[in-house]
């Protein structure tokens, strides 16, 4: 049981920078800055089925925010882990020295993993005529709520696996814990009126 709780703690210590980056990016995307990047990734284009590729919610500003903020908070968190003797609780540092260049690389890859792994979900939802920022009704609702929260975590956990051999069970554990955390954060942002829909 002690090992179980330590593993959960290590998951949170490892994912802390990207969790913080995701929350701050939600706020950043609503600020009246870098307006030139507030345009859809797909440029408003549709496929032959007449449906958008990703929709209006996937913007260049959001992608830029994921990269910039993940790099920033990965560097800051690396310094905090070093000062607080928490490196043994961070999977990134179990086989690698905690350095600023390493944390810049980690932040860049986390930004890529977070943003790119959201796109297939958006693509599928457009094919199913699900309104951007919302989910489907009916029996598939629970599945899509989980997928909405887990898609980016699949990417971030894969980045961790590059630096530490997680194995499939620990990888899936990261996805589950990350998705549940994402759900709780979305609920908090919704109640703080920083998010239009809870799910």
Image: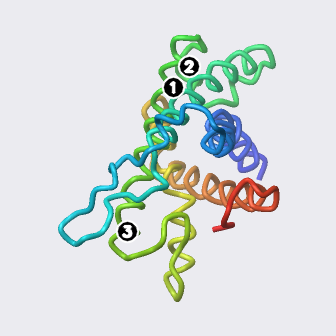
- Measure the alpha-carbon separation of dots 3 and 1: 31 Å
In this view, the residue farthest toward the bottom is 138
165 sits to left or right of 87: left
The answer to which of marks 3 and 2 sits earlier in the sequence is 2
Question: Which residue occupies 69% across, 54% down?
Answer: 181
- Residue that numbered label 3 is attached to: 126
Q: Which image quarter holds the C terminus?
A: bottom right
65 sits to left or right of 2: left
Question: Which residue occupies 57% across, 70% down?
Answer: 145
The percent position of residue 77, horizontal first and vertical second, equals 69, 24
Q: Nearer the viewer, residue 143 or 137?
A: 137
The percent position of residue 90, horizontal first and vertical second, equals 65, 30
Residue 96's place in the image compared with 117, above or below, is: above
Neighbourhood count class around disc 2 (C-alpha, 10 Å): few under 14, some 14–19, many 20 upward: many
Neighbourhood count class around disc 3 (C-alpha, 10 Å): few under 14, some 14–19, many 20 upward: some
Q: Nearer the viewer, mark 3 or mark 1?
A: 3
The answer to which of marks 3 and 1 sits earlier in the sequence is 1
Q: Which mark is residue 103?
A: 2
Task: Verify CB contact (< 8 Å) between mark 2 and mark 1.
Answer: yes
Helix or strand or loop: what does disc 1 sit on? helix
191 sits to left or right of 39: right
In this view, the residue farthest toward the left is 48
Question: Which residue occupies 41% across, 48% down?
Answer: 40
Q: Which mark is residue 106?
A: 1
The percent position of residue 85, horizontal first and vertical second, equals 78, 19
Residue 79's place in the image compared with 65, above or below, is: above
Q: Nearer the viewer, residue 90 or 188?
A: 188
Residue 159's place in the image compared with 49, above or below, is: above
Helix or strand or loop: what does disc 2 sit on? helix
182 sits to left or right of 47: right
């Amino acid at each position: 049981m002690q090992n179980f709780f330590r593993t959960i703690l290590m998951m949170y210590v490892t994912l802390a920078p990207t969790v913080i980056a995701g929350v701050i990016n939600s706020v950043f995307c609503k600020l009246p800055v870098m307006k030139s990047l507030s345009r859809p990734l797909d440029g408003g284009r549709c496929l032959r089925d007449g449906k958008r590729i990703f929709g209006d919610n996937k913007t260049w500003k959001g992608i830029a925010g994921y990269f910039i903020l993940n790099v920033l908070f990965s560097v800051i968190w690396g310094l905090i882990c070093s000062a607080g003797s928490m490196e043994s609780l961070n999977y990134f540092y179990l086989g690698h020295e905690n350095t600023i260049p390493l944390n810049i690389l980690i932040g860049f890859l986390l930004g890529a993993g977070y943003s790119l792994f959201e796109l297939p979900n958006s693509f599928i939802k457009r094919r199913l005529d699900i309104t951007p920022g919302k989910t489907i009704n009916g029996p598939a609702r629970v599945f899509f709520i989980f997928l909405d929260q887990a898609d980016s975590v699949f990417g971030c956990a894969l980045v961790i696996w590059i630096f530490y051999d997680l194995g499939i069970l620990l990888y899936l554990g990261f996805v589950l814990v990350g998705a549940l955390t994402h759900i709780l954060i979305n609920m908090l942002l919704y109640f703080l009126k920083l998010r239009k829909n809870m799910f």
